[in-house]
Amino acid sequence: MIGKLRAALGAHGVFVRGVVCFDGGEGPLLQDGTPARSVILFGNIGGSIWEPFSRWRQLPENAGCRDPLDDWSKQIIEPIAAAFSATAYFPSDPPWQPFQRWAMQAEGLRASPLGILIHPEYGLWHGYRGALGFAESIEERGAGAVSKHPCDHCAEKPCLTACPVGAVTSAGFDVAGCRSHLRMDSGRAGCMTGGCLARNACPVGTNYRYSPAQLAFHMAALHP
Ligand code: B12
Ligand code: SF4
Ligand code: SF4
């Protein structure tokens, strides 16, 4: 099944990111109200989704979408959910499913000071586009294999000094401080156009960094 999912989603730049198995009713609820025994996570690696998504977005029928990336993700993942008799979950749909907790279990990732999970190869340049829940356990060889945490080996930690308003600290991320800066002229000209300066400062996975157009898109989607 994993091979079929990889083939179906790969053309869209969406990758199978890992599998989580649950015991004792801990999984999210399936459509029939019973708890899932496993979840398969899907996401982008670097700018993998940007070209397929941008082509879709340029079609006249998609011009008026309010949340185009969420709509695109649903258009490609929901039919696959139906074909596999699975329940689809999406990161922006309330109630928020614990995508990051699942990714920590599935891929062995840990959080960076920014709040987003860091991958030893892709750095901060990856995200989650959806997940499928199943009534049965799915074994995936290699799941949870990543154990190295890049932040433990990063002596200078430039992400902690790059934010102009000090919103990224080792104690956590100051959402309100970040938001108020993004509303100012300096924030509009800086982070809103070129992306979060703290994220950009991270030396890990720079080959996977998003293009300027993708960075600006995500910032606008997050802080309309
Ligand atoms: C709410 C939310 C935010 C809020 C955070 C508010 C807060 N203080 O919690 C805001 C709007 C600030 C935010 C910002 C960003 N987010 Co956000 N966000 C979410 C969302 C929708 C829900 C998180 C949540 O509460 N989950 C519920 C709990 C139960 O799940 P959990 O996994 O157990 O909880 C984890 C999080 O709460 C996390 N956490 C705690 N505090 C913070 C703070 C921040 C900023 C983040 C990102 C996470 C985080 O720690 C928990 C780990 O166990 C998730 C999608 C999702 N469903 O997970 C995306 C998500 C976490 N965000 C993501 C991203 C990429 C971002 C941004 C970089 C977006 C951008 N600009 O491009 C920024 C990062 C900050 C910045 N410098 O701009 C990605 C992270 C991918 C990754 N590699 O880990 C996610 C998974 C969405 C996705 N489609 O992939 N985000
Ligand atoms: S700059 Fe260093 S501490 Fe900050 S996220 Fe990157 S690896 Fe982690
Ligand atoms: S987006 Fe800008 S203000 Fe917000 S945390 Fe990143 S660098 Fe700081």
Image: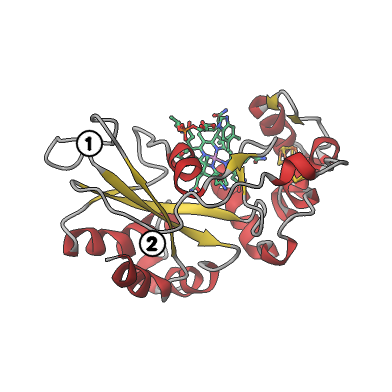
Tell whether circle 2 marks a residue whose Cβ is less than 8 angstroms from ligand 1: no
As drawn, the residue found furthest toward the left would be 32
Residue type at tag 2: Trp
Q: Is residue 221 visible?
A: yes
Q: Is residue 118 positioned above or below 114 on the image?
A: below
- Asked whether the viewer can see residue 223, the reply is no
Q: Residue at x 75, y 28 (%)?
A: 170
Compared to 12, does 176 lie above or below? above
Q: Which residue in the structure is indicated by mark 1?
A: 29
Q: Quadrant of residue 46?
A: bottom right
How many residues crowd mark 1 within 10 Å: few (<14), some (14–19), many (20+)? some
Disc 2: CA contacts within 10 A as few (<14), some (14-19) or many (>=20):
some
Q: Nearer the viewer, residue 58 or 164?
A: 164
Q: Is residue 199 above or below residue 114?
A: below
Q: Quadrant of residue 183?
A: top right
Question: According to the image, label 2 marks what residue?
Answer: 72
- Secondary element under disc 2, as helix, strand or loop, is helix
